[in-house]
Image: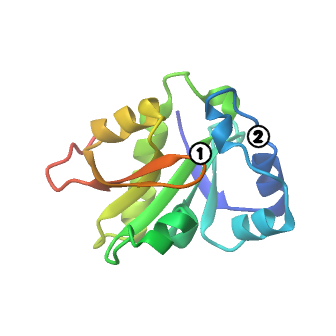
Amino acid sequence: MNLTAKPMTQTIATEILKWRYPYPYDFYNNEMTEESLAEMLDGTYRAVQDERGELFGFYCTGPSAQVPAGRRMGVYPSGYIDFGLGVKPAETGQGKGSEFFAYVRDQIRASHPDKPMRLTVAAFNKRAIRLYENFGFTQEQEFKTDFAKFQTMRESKTGKKL
């Protein structure tokens, strides 16, 4: 799979905000609001296309990749580059997650070579946690909101360089 990242556009952001995942991943469904659209267009999001030019997924960095409640609880100490990512629902469960994750990780590492990487994942998402662990990410902190339990994971210095 040959992936390419490009700046987020309003058209792509609108498409992503309309994605619908099946249970239990419906937790990741977004609402189409002016606020959510503005966030996706704030310069911290990138669209990822496959070799056919089709939208495959996206990633974001910085505060957009953090859970706001976690920020209020102090689970995001400085010194890291936070990132988040999402894959088009039709592409999930197809065995392409490792390649997509490696691409995103490499893109972020190229832009932020001196910062360790951190991500936040819903604790129920064992499939994603296993993927991140396979790339050498380890659990850092757990926190709970009114809606879900989350954990932060950081890139381990001894982690795999897949």
Say which quadrant the C terminus sits in.
top left
Q: Position of residue 115 (x, y in %)?
A: 30, 71
Side of 25 where 38 appears, left or right: right
* Element carrying mark 1: strand
Residue at the image point whose x is 54% and y is 46% from the top: 148
Residue 11, percent across and down? Answer: 84, 56
The tag earlier along the polypeptide, 1 or 2, is 2
Depth check, front residue: 42 or 112: 42
Eyeballing the image, is 96 above or below 49? above
Mark 1 sits on what residue? 86
Residue 37, image x, y percentages: 79, 64
Q: Residue furthest left?
A: 158
Pointer 1 local density, CA inside 10 Å: few below 14, some 14–19, many at least 20: some
Please, what secondary structure does the residue beneath circle 2 have? loop
Asked whether the viewer can see residue 21, the reply is yes
Identified at 54% across, 55% down, the residue is: 145
Name the kind of residue labelled 1 in the image.
Answer: Gly
Residue in the picture at 39% in, 68% down: 81
Q: Is residue 68 left or right of residue 125?
A: right
Residue 73: quarter of image: bottom left
Can you identify the residue that label 2 sits on? 19
Q: What is the quadrant of residue 154 in the picture?
A: bottom left
Confirm whether residue 88 shows in the render.
no
Given residues 48 and 97, the one toward you in this image is 97
Q: Dots 1 and 2: beta carbons under 8 Å?
A: yes
